[in-house]
Structure formats: structure tokens, C-alpha cells
Image (spheres, rainbow, N blue to C red):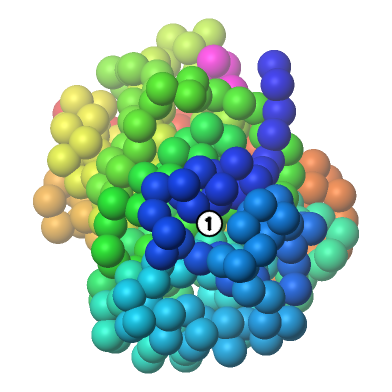
Amino acid sequence: MERRSTREALKDALPELAGLDEGVVVIDADVASSTYTKTFAEEFPDRYYSVGIAEQNMVEVASGMALAGMKPYAVAFSSFLAGRAYDQIRCCVAMPDLNVKLIATHAGITVGEDGGTHQMLEDLALMRALPNMTVMVPADYWSARDLIVSSFKYDKPLYIRLGRMDVPIFYSPKEEFKPGGGKIVREGRDVTVIACGIMLFEALKAAEILARQGIEAEVIDCYSVKPLPEDLIQSSVRRTGCCVVAEEHNQVGGLYGAVAESLGINYPVPLRFVAIRDRFGESGAPAELQEYYSLTHREIVGAVAQVWATRRR
């Protein structure tokens, strides 16, 4: 199966966006090669801006461009976009509700050897807490590309989380994605497994193992973390009676938090998570870190065993 990183979608999606509207501009923080904005810079040099290693300034420049009627896409590593520039995102983008697209690459522990300072594990919680902000986590190249291109339709602040590691190409180029959406990628009647980003592939592996044990898992790609596809999730959980959430993020405030908040109000069921257990990252190879932080299909199978025993009937 072909593998590509979700950040590679920027290489093709940004030039495509430029063809849709002359107001589309790209700003980055001296990371053109790592984020593939270099391609856009070469094709549209008069619409590309590098502010240097100054993410806070980058967000302020983007907000000014939006106020001037332009359509800026600000691209940087997630640790330094969501983390370092949080105050600017809050005050200069989310609060005035500006049409600024924030594209965060190199998210999660699978950044690898760069270590804990570069492994952003809290960004979904930070972005989800901001009024007016939409938060998206595509799982593969095609979902990332469509989300970036289709973001052009929404005149709102939007945060898209992309990864560095190559992952399987799961979707076809014809698939469409939108804020508030999710996709049932495997149907089942016994347990709902909700995942985003790279954990979708671990969820599908877990579903294969569970099927051999006589448990049919319904797997949902919850690429829209905010707004959450609540109707889709509740419909599935009402059929299965239990739920497991898997994400490459801190257990606090990310997809698990969003699902727990929704189900807690609307349809409480036995619920477990597979996520980073409230700690920072460390240096290591991506595959080794997935094992070290228990972000594999084995943990999902174990979590299913826990909720299955007490599922709501």
C-alpha cells in the first residue's frame, strides 16, 4: 500500500488553492522545505511570505492580511504555531473571527527524534477551547488534501493538524471532507471505536483482531474534532452501547475529551481512551514511540475488552 505523510498534501493543495482565488497567500516561519510550502513559493513567489522563525509575528501578519481582504494560510510546526503563537491566535484570529487558516505540521509524538519540544501533544485541547475555531485532523494524504482545498469555502478560523510520518493512503481522491463531518470506515454492531489521524490505522488493525474474537467493531474516522459529528457518534453508540477513543494526543482536552463531553450529556456509555497519558514526549524513532506511549492496536483491543464487559444494552 502506498504511503505518504499528511503534510505532503500541502505540496499539491496550496497551489491548487492559488488557482481558485488571487487573494490566497501563504505565510510560513522559515520551514518551506519541511512543510512543502516551497512548491507554492516557487510557483507563486509574489503570494508567498516567509517571516523567519517568528510564529507569533506570522499569525499577526496573517490576521492583518485577512482584515485587508486576503485569504492567508499560515503554516508552521504545530509546537510553535499552536504553542508559541497561542496568544496571537486567540486575540488576533479567533476573537475577531478572521478568515485565517492555520496549518500545523509535525504534530504528535511521531515527529520522532526531534524530541519533546517539537512533539506537540496539547494542540487539539488548546485550539478546541477557542470560540470560533474549527479543528480538523485528517488521517491520510487525500483527506488532508481535500480538507485544505475545501477550507477555502469557509470564511472562519480553521486549524488543520498534519503529521510528519508516512502513513497508508486510505481514501480515494473522490472522497469529500467537511467541518463537522466523520466517516464510518468499518461497520460493526458491538463497539464503537472513534479515532483520528494516525490512530485510524491502529483502530482498523484492532477491528480485524476483534472480529476474529467475535466482536464486530464499528470504526469512525472523526477527522472533525470541532465541531464534532455528534449525530454520527451518537447513532453508532446507541447501536453498540460502548465506545473507545484513540488519538495521538494528550488524554486531556482532545478528541477523547470532546467525545466524553458529548456522550456524557446525550448518551452515557462505558468509555475508554487510548492516548498519551498526560505526559510530554521524548526523543525516539516514531514506531518505537508509538510502542512506548501505548498508541497501538493492542491497546485498543484491550480497551474494547474493558468497555465490552459493561456495555449499555
| Rendering coords of residue 271 (x, y %) | 35, 46
| Rendering coords of residue 7 (x, y %) | 64, 49
In this rendering, position of residue 76 left or right of residue 173: right
Judge whether 132 appears above or below 297 on screen.
Answer: below
Q: Quadrant of the C terminus?
A: top left
| SS class, disc 1 | strand
Asked which quadrant contains residue 33, the reply is bottom right
In this rendering, position of residue 226 left or right of residue 23: left
Judge whether 165 appears above or below 131 on screen.
Answer: above
Judge whether 42 appears above or below 79 on screen.
Answer: above
Kind of residue at badge 1: Arg
What residue lies at 41% left-to-right and 35% top-to-bottom?
Answer: 221
In the image, 230 versus 9, the foreground residue is: 9
What residue lies at 29% left-to-right and 66% top-to-bottom?
Answer: 156
Q: Quadrant of the N terminus?
A: top right
Asked which quadrant contains residue 192, the reply is top left
Residue hosting label 1: 161
- Point out the stretch of residues depicted in magenta: 205-209
| Rendering coords of residue 230 (x, y %) | 20, 46
| Residue 26 in view in this figure | yes
What residue lies at 79% left-to-right and 48% top-to-bottom?
Answer: 286
Q: How many marks?
A: 1
Circle 1 Cα neighbour tier, 10 Å, few/some/many (<14 / 14–19 / ≥20): many
Residue 210 lies in magenta, yes or no?
A: no
In the image, 175 versus 261, the foreground residue is: 175
In the image, 109 versus 41, the foreground residue is: 41
What residue lies at 46% left-to-right and 69% top-to-bottom?
Answer: 72
In this rendering, position of residue 171 left or right of residue 93: right
Q: Main secondary structure of the magenta part?
A: helix
| Residue 290 in view in this figure | no
Asked which quadrant contains residue 312, the reply is top left
| Rendering coords of residue 110 (x, y %) | 73, 52
